[in-house]
């Protein structure tokens, strides 16, 4: 018995050292993240995402959510590497009834559960990279991955959310001198293997991007994005059998000139919008036929642009900064309907939390949360560093619709007073960020949105203000 035990122990030690040598040969490194965030929310309901506080002045809801990530980065050899990221997302104490776990009722991990039923661990990213693929000056990245480009305007990881966003994608990058060329294919939706006639129920995304450094004190990126949706699935969960293809072309120039930080970008969208038009013709009040147009052939004709200028004073006490920006996203009005056009810009896979206020009231990529009226955002942002490791940020947003409510049938049919114009409301965002140590960031924030009558499109009643707050601990290792 003693001999068998010693033999087993010896084999275990040998296996451990062999595995260690293999890991060292493959250059495996591990990292991870634990982020817990308390949030207080007055303006939305988790059940239906309705504007609760704005409608009935009810109290808010507070909760704590945690994201846990474990990463493995493997450098196999000089030309091959791989990355795997496991992730678990959970809300504390959710929920008392373990029978609801996994069915939308919670994760079954309350203190009253005799057995932890939390099965939320999943694969967030898993891809490999081949440098100089096929002896060409191109790097290949294949697998589930984040696609983040140029400030998250069209492609971002939505990292503010607990789960964040990834894509099943193939990406090719060519870098030479001061330019980079990128092609990415994203299989955004695969509708199974039994009814895929000509793959009409799939959603495919093709991205072309060229980036040039050293232009006007910064970088220029030129985009071409084709989202192929022959089934109209992007308008909902059920195939409508109509085209909803989106062609997006545009550019982004950002850099620094004469000590001033700046950004300017413009994107135009064309393509077929029959599915979008049909959906909102019934649910959103866009009556093409009444306006003299037709629902049988609707073209997409939309745009967005954004500009920003700012200055950071590094040689002044507390290093203050000031930024002014303006974004405009087009909407749909009577002239669009009469011309059988759909004029609302689709923000694709952006990280809207970076742009449209911390309370995330205008994140809908299809309608901007304004029932196709479009959106404009005039913002002023400032920051201070009162002491090392501490940053104070403040932002003021004034939101309006891009389309005059009187020229949109949905807005006209609401019980709005004659004094209502494009004004949606104002939002103030405050944040305090502290770098506690090299691996830990503690942050807190407070926001308030003062809504105007137009904001409450569903009832047309005068709207209230709503508060939002958070405290976050983010530990990375």
Image (cartoon, rainbow, N blue to C red):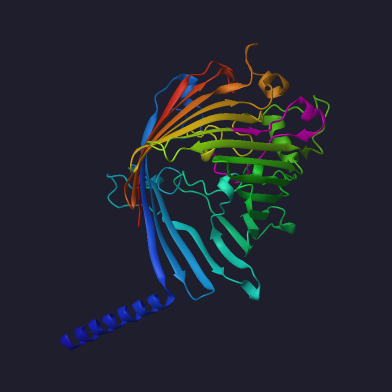
Quick one: 131 or 336, which is closer to the camera? 131
Residue drawn at x 58%, y 51% as measured from the top left: 149
Percent x, y for residue 361? 53, 32
Is residue 40 in view from this perspective? no
Magenta stretch encompasses residue 178: no
Q: Is residue 146 left or right of residue 445?
A: right
Residue at 57% across, 41% down: 258
Please report the bounds of the magenta region as a residue range.
326-352
Q: Quadrant of residue 202?
A: bottom right
The quarter of the image holding the C terminus is: bottom left
Q: Residue at x 20, y 83 (%)?
A: 5
Q: Is residue 73 visible?
A: yes
Please give the count of numbered marks on the rendered protein: 0
Whether residue 342 is in magenta: the answer is yes
**Outermost residue toward the top?**
418
Between residue 105 and residue 397, name the one nearer to us.
397
Towards the viewer: 75 or 123:
75
The answer to whether 132 is drawn above or below residue 178 in the figure is below
- Asked if residue 180 is positioned above or below residue 93 in the image, the reply reads below
- Residue lying at the far left in this picture: please name it: 2
x and y percent of residue 162 in the render? 44, 46
Residue extending farthest to the bottom is 3
Question: Residue 32: x percent and y percent?
Answer: 38, 57
Image location of residue 444, percent across then percent down:
36, 37
The quarter of the image holding the N terminus is bottom left
């Amino acid at each position: 018995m003693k001999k068998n035990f010693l033999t087993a122990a010896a084999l275990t030690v040998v296996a451990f050292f062999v595995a260690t040598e293999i890991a060292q040969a493959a250059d495996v490194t591990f990292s991870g993240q634990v982020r817990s965030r308390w949030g207080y929310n007055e303006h939305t309901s988790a059940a239906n995402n309705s504007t609760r506080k704005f409608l009935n002045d009810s109290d808010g809801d507070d909760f704590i959510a945690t994201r846990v990530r474990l990463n493995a980065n493997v450098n196999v050899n000089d030309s091959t590497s791989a990355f795997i990221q496991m992730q678990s997302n959970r809300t504390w104490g959710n929920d008392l009834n373990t029978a609801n776990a996994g069915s939308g009722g919670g994760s079954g991990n309350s203190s009253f559960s005799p057995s932890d039923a939390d099965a939320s661990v999943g694969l967030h990213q898993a891809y490999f990279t081949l440098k100089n693929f096929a002896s060409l000056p191109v790097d290949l990245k294949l697998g589930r991955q984040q696609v983040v480009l140029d400030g998250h305007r069209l492609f971002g990881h939505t990292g503010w959310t607990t789960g964040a966003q990834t894509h099943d994608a193939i990406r090719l990058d060519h870098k030479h001198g001061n330019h980079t060329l990128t092609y990415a294919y994203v299989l955004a939706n695969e509708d199974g293997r039994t009814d895929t006639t000509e793959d009409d129920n799939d959603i495919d995304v093709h991205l072309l991007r060229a980036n040039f450094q050293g232009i006007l004190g910064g970088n220029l990126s030129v985009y071409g994005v084709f989202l192929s949706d022959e089934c109209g699935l992007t308008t909902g969960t059920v195939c409508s059998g109509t085209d909803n293809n989106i062609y997006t072309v545009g550019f982004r120039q950002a850099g620094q000139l004469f000590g001033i930080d700046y950004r300017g970008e413009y994107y135009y969208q064309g393509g077929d919008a029959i599915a979008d038009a049909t959906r909102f013709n019934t649910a959103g009040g866009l009556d093409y036929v009444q306006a003299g147009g037709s629902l049988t052939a609707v073209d997409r004709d939309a745009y967005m642009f954004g500009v920003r200028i700012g200055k950071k004073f590094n040689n002044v006490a507390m290093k203050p900064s000031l930024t002014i920006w303006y974004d405009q996203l087009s909407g749909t009005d009577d002239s669009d309907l009469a011309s059988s056009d759909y004029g609302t810009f689709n923000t694709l896979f952006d990280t809207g939390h970076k742009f449209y206020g911390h309370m995330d009231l205008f994140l809908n990529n299809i309608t901007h949360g304004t029932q196709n009226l479009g959106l404009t955002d005039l913002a002023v942002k400032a920051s201070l560093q009162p002491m090392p490791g501490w940053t104070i940020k403040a932002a003021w947003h004034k939101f309006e619709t891009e389309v005059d409510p009187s020229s949109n049938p949905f807005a006209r049919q609401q019980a709005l007073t004659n004094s209502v114009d494009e004004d949606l409301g104002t939002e103030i965002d405050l944040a305090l960020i502290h770098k506690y140590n090299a691996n830990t960031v503690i942050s807190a924030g407070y926001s308030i949105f003062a809504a105007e009558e137009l904001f409450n499109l569903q009832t047309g009643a005068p709207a209230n203000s709503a508060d939002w707050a958070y405290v976050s601990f983010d530990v990375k290792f």
